[in-house]
Image (cartoon, helix red, strand yellow):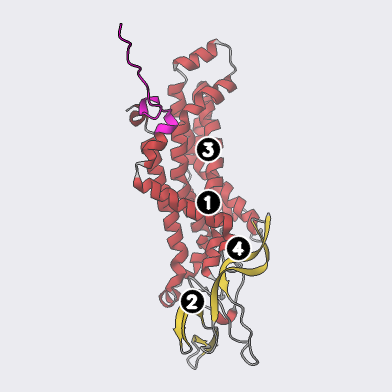
């Protein structure tokens, strides 16, 4: 008898791939979501490596260079052409109209370098380093020229002569992590309250849902202001950071808990949950091992889409002077300078933190939309 041909099954075909591999495959097909993921990777690189990427410390200021415009790199001057980009040392002065002006010393050059030596500092307070990613050569000031400063302001300077790009790098540690911390707290509270409420039902469900409704009835932004005013004004920046995280989390967990409760109500009647009960498993184990894991797809998408709300909430509080306070930077309190229309017209580079807020919010929304489509059960079946 002729032998039957051997049938081989390719493990890479969708029929033989697990749900998470299918979701990742579907996610990669969505170009906006992939672009958003790369944008978030760059922004979180700023968070991790701000101590190296930023050319100066966030509070390093030169009062003579207040509102200095973005530094212009040069390749030629009166001394000729140079393959290495450089800047001329600058000093500030007040003209006869009491306007702040800057003038350059064109007789000297300060060359741009990478991995320049710097004062001892550490990455995230853990890894000691003595260099910055880029910066200018140190110049030797001759007698009478000490008022000139060689500074490289990539995005310009603020009203205190501090580098805006450096402050954006350090400020990303607050603006880009406050959403992760707040969302993590919301997920924990929401999963616990929603899971218990939907699984047990009865008076437990009624009690917890009335609590959720009370929280949801409160106007969110005014509740933020009220809770913030309850804290003393002389709190440290670290304490203010965690206070803002807790405030934002306490406002946002109720809606998430109600959605989880609805999902658990439908899951608790499935065959595998009934089988687990028949085997005598405890309620806590059934909820943790068999009920809540089936909400993972929604939880991931909801977390990704809710993080922008925390970024905007912190920015709004800091913009009003109720969040992170100077000199510690966040993208929100850096935008306080843009509230003065005169300063905004004369120094438009103060809007750079707003651009980074926009990019972060758009990136999270694009990734969230991609995850929502990729984790759609109907799509995974096909």
Magenta-highlighted residues:
1-22
Q: Earlier in the sequence, mark 1 or mark 4?
A: 1
Marks 2, 3: nearer the viewer: 2
Badge 4 density bin: few <14, some 14–19, many ≥20, Cα 10 Å:
some
Question: Height in image: 18 above or below 3?
Answer: below
Marks 1, 4: nearer the viewer: 4
Residue at x 48% of width, y 47% of height: 307
The residue where tag 3 is placed is 187
The residue where tag 2 is placed is 85
Badge 3 density bin: few <14, some 14–19, many ≥20, Cα 10 Å:
many
The residue where tag 1 is placed is 224
The span from disc 2 to disc 4 (Cα, nearest Å) is: 32 Å
Q: Earlier in the sequence, mark 1 or mark 2?
A: 2
> How far across and how far down the image is residue 26, in percent?
37, 37
Residue at x 52% of width, y 28% of height: 195
- The answer to whether the residue labelled 1 contacts the one labelled 2, judged by CB atoms less than 8 Å apart, is no
The residue where tag 4 is placed is 328
Q: Earlier in the sequence, mark 3 or mark 1?
A: 3
């Amino acid at each position: 008898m002729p032998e039957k041909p051997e049938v081989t099954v390719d493990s890479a075909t969708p029929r033989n791939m697990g749900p998470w591999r299918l979701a990742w495959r579907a996610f990669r097909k969505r170009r906006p979501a992939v672009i958003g993921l790369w944008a978030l990777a760059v922004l979180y690189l700023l968070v991790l490596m701000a101590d190296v990427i930023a050319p100066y410390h966030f509070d390093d200021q030169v009062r003579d260079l207040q509102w200095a415009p973005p530094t212009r790199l040069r390749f030629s001057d009166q001394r000729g052409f140079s393959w290495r980009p450089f800047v001329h040392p600058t000093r500030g002065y007040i003209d006869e109209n009491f306007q702040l002006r800057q003038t350059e010393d064109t007789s000297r050059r300060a060359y741009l370098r990478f991995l320049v030596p710097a004062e001892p500092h550490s990455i995230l307070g853990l890894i000691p380093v003595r260099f910055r990613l880029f910066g200018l050569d140190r110049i030797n000031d001759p007698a009478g020229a000490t008022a000139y400063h060689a500074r490289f302001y990539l995005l310009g300077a603020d009203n205190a002569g501090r580098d805006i790009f450096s402050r954006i790098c350090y400020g990303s540690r607050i603006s880009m992590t406050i959403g992760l911390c707040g969302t993590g707290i919301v997920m924990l509270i929401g999963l616990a309250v929603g899971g218990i409420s939907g699984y047990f039902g009865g008076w437990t469900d009624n009690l917890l849902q009335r609590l959720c409704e009370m929280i949801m009835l409160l106007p969110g932004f005014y509740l933020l202001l009220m809770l913030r005013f309850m804290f003393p004004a002389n709190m440290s920046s670290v304490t203010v950071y965690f206070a803002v995280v807790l405030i934002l989390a306490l406002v946002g967990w109720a809606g998430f808990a109600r959605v989880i409760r609805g999902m658990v109500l439908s899951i608790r009647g499935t065959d595998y949950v009934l089988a687990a009960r028949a085997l005598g498993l405890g309620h806590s184990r059934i909820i943790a091992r068999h009920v809540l894991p089936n909400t993972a797809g929604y939880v991931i998408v909801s977390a990704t889409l809710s993080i922008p709300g925390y970024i905007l909430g912190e920015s709004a509080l800091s913009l009003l002077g109720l969040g992170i306070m100077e000199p510690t930077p966040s993208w929100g309190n850096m935008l306080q300078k843009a509230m003065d229309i005169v300063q905004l017209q004369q120094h438009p580079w103060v809007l750079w933190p707003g651009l980074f807020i926009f990019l972060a919010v758009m990136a999270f929304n694009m990734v969230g939309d991609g995850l929502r489509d990729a984790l759609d059960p109907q799509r995974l079946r096909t």
